[in-house]
Structures are given as C-alpha cells and as structure tokens.
Image (cartoon, helix red, strand yellow):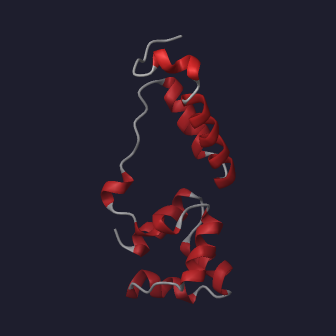
C-alpha cells in the first residue's frame, strides 16, 4: 500500500480525513492533494506530528497489505481484550502491555503455560 492509501485509511479509522490532518500540521490543506495525486511525502517532522495526531506510529503510514491482516479473536474474552486495547491511548497501551507481560511471567502460572483450559 502507498503512503497515501495508508494515511487515508488511518484517518478514516480515526474518524477524520487527510485534509484536516494536513491543515493541523502545515496550516494549509493544499498538501493533502499533493499526497493523494502526486504521491508526495511530508517532511519527517510533519510525519511525526501526523502520527501523534492520529495516535499511531509513522511506520503505520508505510504498512504493506500483509501487515494489515485483521486479528480474529478466538473467543469473547479475546474480543473484549482487543476492544479495550484498541480504545486505549498510546501511553495506556504501553501500560496495558507491561501488565500483560508481568501477568504472563508470574511463577504461579508456569504450570499452566501452553494450555487454554479455563481456571
């Protein structure tokens, strides 16, 4: 996928559009047309600001098709976890994952690793 395709997809997912993001970063929306029609790329500092506004990574602007595979939850619990995670801010996602890794490494769970049985 191109930069333009990715950033437009991300904007749509976040409930905004490229014109609004470009205007917020550059003060003018005309560069949005250059991105969409000429394949122009913003400066690195502008990409960082766009990523911040869209609460994503600059790397997301350059994702390939295989990077975008939809995660299919195995059950309702996984679906709830994904829903909660996707609704968090970037900072909260980091805290959430730190907690998940701590939970994963708890010694009392060592015997349960590799199984999916309910507790």
Q: Residue at x 58, y 68 (%)?
A: 51
Residues 18 and 46: in front is 46
Image quadrant in which you'd find residue 40: bottom left
Q: Residue at x 68, y 78 (%)?
A: 24
Image quadrant in which you'd find residue 100: top right
The N terminus is located in which quarter? bottom left
Residues 30 and 51: in front is 51
Q: Is residue 76 above or below residue 54?
A: above
Number of numbered discs on residues: 0
Position of 47 compared to 89: left or right?
A: left
Q: Residue at x 41, y 69 (%)?
A: 62
Residues 14 and 59: in front is 59
Q: Is residue 116 above or below residue 95?
A: above
Q: Is residue 57 above or below residue 70?
A: below
Q: Position of residue 30 (x, y in %)?
A: 56, 89
Position of 26 compared to 13: left or right?
A: right
Position of 68 compared to 80: left or right?
A: left
Q: Position of residue 93 (x, y in %)?
A: 63, 47
Q: Position of residue 75 (x, y in %)?
A: 45, 24
The C terminus is located in which quarter? top right
Q: Position of residue 26 (x, y in %)?
A: 64, 86
């Amino acid at each position: 996928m191109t930069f333009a395709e990715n950033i437009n997809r991300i904007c749509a997912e976040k409930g905004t559009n490229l014109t609004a993001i470009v205007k917020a970063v550059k003060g003018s929306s005309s560069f949005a047309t250059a991105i969409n029609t000429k394949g122009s790329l913003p400066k690195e500092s502008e990409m960082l600001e766009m990523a911040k506004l869209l609460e994503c990574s600059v790397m997301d602007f350059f994702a390939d098709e295989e990077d975008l595979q939809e995660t299919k939850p195995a059950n309702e619990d996984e679906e709830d976890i994904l829903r909660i995670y996707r609704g968090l801010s970037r900072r909260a996602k980091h805290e959430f994952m730190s907690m998940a890794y701590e939970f994963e490494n708890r010694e009392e769970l060592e015997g349960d690793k590799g199984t999916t049985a309910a507790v």
